[in-house]
Amino acid sequence: MKTGIICIVDDDTLIHYTFKKMLESGAPAKKILSFFDCGQLYEYLRVHAQNEKVLPDVILLDLKTPIISGLKFLKQWAVLKPTITKHIVIYVVSSTLNKADIAEAIADPNVSGYLPKPLRWADMRNMIADESESA
């Protein structure tokens, strides 16, 4: 089954490579967007807020990115979200051991789930299956 547009936000190029390979092998995405910091993602979403064809269906968001952290992005997303015409699902995918950061991310009403790194294929498959069922 082909999934929609999936966005990877992580400052680690190896993570981008690994996630892309996982997606290509098990549930090919229509398109994969890659951003290395949340500032890039925010600007992309702001510019394309009314263009559903290029907006992601799912965002895989790392908490620890340079310039703008994942947690700061979630605060900005709460303000930007009403201007976005498409429903976008956000999963936090992080290797942080900071329990306060994890708790804050999970408590955010815009976050659909938390997946620890290293991400296992079973976790990715379950996330995709959950989103396919709810679409």
Image (tube, rainbow, N blue to C red):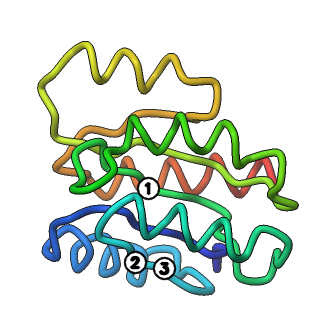
Q: Is residue 85 above or below residue 62?
A: below
Q: Where is residue 118 drawn, in percent x and y?
A: 16, 50
**Quadrant in which the N terminus is drawn:** bottom right
- The mark that comes first in sequence, 1 or 2, is 2
Task: Say which mark, if any, is on residue 60.
Answer: 1
Q: Give whichever of 27, 101 is nearer the camera.
A: 101
Q: Secondary structure at mark 3?
A: strand
Residue lying at 87% horizontally and 61% vertically, measured from the top left: 85
Q: Are dots 2 and 3 in contact, CB under 8 Å? A: yes
Q: Is residue 42 above or below residue 80?
A: below
Looking at the rendered structure, the kind of residue marked 1 is: Leu
* Image quadrant in which you'd find residue 58: bottom right
Q: Where is residue 115 drawn, in percent x and y?
A: 35, 39
- Spatial CA distance of label 1 from label 3 is 10 Å
Residue assigned mark 3 = 33
Residue lying at 15% horizontally and 67% vertically, measured from the top left: 12
Looking at the rendered structure, the kind of residue marked 3 is: Leu
Task: Say which mark, if any, is on residue 34.
Answer: 2
